Amino acid sequence: MTSARIKLMQGGLKTLHTLKVHTVMRPFSEGLGMIVTLHRVRPTAERIDALGAYPEFDPNGLLEITPEFLDEALKALKLSGLSIVSFDEMIDAVRSTSLRKGRVAAITFDDGYIDNQQHALPVLEAHNAPAMIYMPSDYPQGRGELWWVAIEQIIRRTESLLFPHVPEKGPQQTRTSEEKLSFYLELYWHLRAVDQDHQRSLVREMCADQGFDMFDLCRQLIVDEPGLKQLHAHPLISIGAHTMSHRAIAALSPDDALAEMSGGADWLEGALGARPKHFAFPYGDSGSAGPRDFALAQQAGFESAVTTRKGMIYREHRDSLFGLPRVSLNGNFQDRRYLEVFASGAPFLLANRLRKVA
């Protein structure tokens, strides 16, 4: 997401807050509650060290928040009238045919980063807040290909790069933060558009050319199998499935898609002794998961599946449990005012043209 678009969205949310549009719409937009999406949680100092000499080059910053903001977010959700419940309780609330007193929020993390255990878990414990962690099965085995992080780190440490398999472009300058971001965005969306086997091949080739170990990156960032077992044993934590190798399900054949979904759950069942009941679609946007894939998630035996489509949870989702929307705690929107607007559901209902189930 470009800085111009981020500023535009921030401005729109501030306007909604100043004009109190969210308070007017709340009775119509707040619904049963919300499912919150997070990825990474780490202290500002640790993040600044990781950004190094190019702090303005931060293409994956939207996936990170600080522990302090997580604490503030949980407080804000409670003040907005939301009870933080387990994911099973959230699904029970959606399925219920009786009117529920009070609204609920479920906290979810994607991918299983080590900082979830190091920095997020203590905050969850302080609030007695349950959370779901959706884990691709390749990741705790040290085989994960976090390609979007790999290309960021390669670009961060170079001053010139060739665009993979497009020799006519010639060497591209990546000396400044602006040049790095421009190269990253072009490469990222190119990789998202190509066949995923080709995508992984291009990134592996790029890593090999730069002497970069993508599997070592996985081991640095993601909890290993013993760590996953510790999380699974924690009374506040549930583990959900997130495929084997974090591939966009919509881009796969039905057989390959089902194998990715079921295979990830099979490994987690073997490692943890319990089969995950809930699933999250990698990437989760409308181009990565659609109606066919929602049906496949049900066929794979899950009780629910979440996307990254933006929206609150409504009673109408009782018939759409395999394409549930979520609300991201985005690193670019770490502001109490945004949280208040998000918790009302107003911006999502407006964006979805007043459709509760998009």
Image (cartoon, helix red, strand yellow):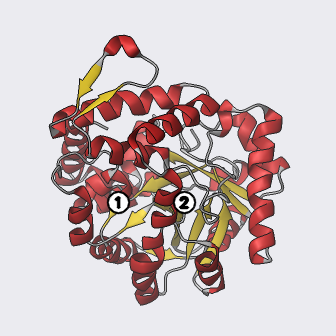
Residue 162, above or below 320: above
Residue 260: horizontal and vertical position, in percent? 74, 47
Label 1 secondary element:
strand
Name the quadrant containing residue 224. Answer: bottom right
Name the quadrant containing residue 333. Answer: bottom left
At 85% from the left edge and 48% from the top edge, which residue is drawn?
299
Residue 279, above or below 169: below
At 67% from the left edge and 39% from the top edge, which residue is drawn?
249
The answer, for residue 276, to whether it is visible in the render is no
Residue 196, above or below 306: above
Q: Earlier in the sequence, mark 2 or mark 1?
A: 1
**What amino acid does circle 2 point to?**
Asp
Judge left or right: residue 294 versus residue 123. right
Give residue 12's mark.
none
Label 2 secondary element:
loop
Residue 262: horizontal and vertical position, in percent? 80, 53
At 80% from the left edge and 34% from the top edge, which residue is drawn?
254
Name the quadrant containing residue 173. Answer: top left
**What amino acid does circle 1 point to?**
Glu
Front in this rendered view, residue 279 or 170:
170
Residue 162: horizontal and vertical position, in percent? 34, 25
Local packing at callout 2 (Cα closer than 10 Å; few below 14, some 14-19, many 20+) is many
Question: From the image, which quarter does the N terminus lie in?
Answer: top left
Q: Where does label 1 land, which residue?
A: 64
| Cα–Cα span, label 2 and label 1 | 13 Å
Judge left or right: residue 184 versus residue 201. left
Front in this rendered view, residue 154 or 260:
154
Give residue 111's mark.
2
Residue 165: horizontal and vertical position, in percent? 46, 20
At 47% from the left edge and 62% from the top edge, which residue is drawn?
36
Judge left or right: residue 175 versus residue 218. left
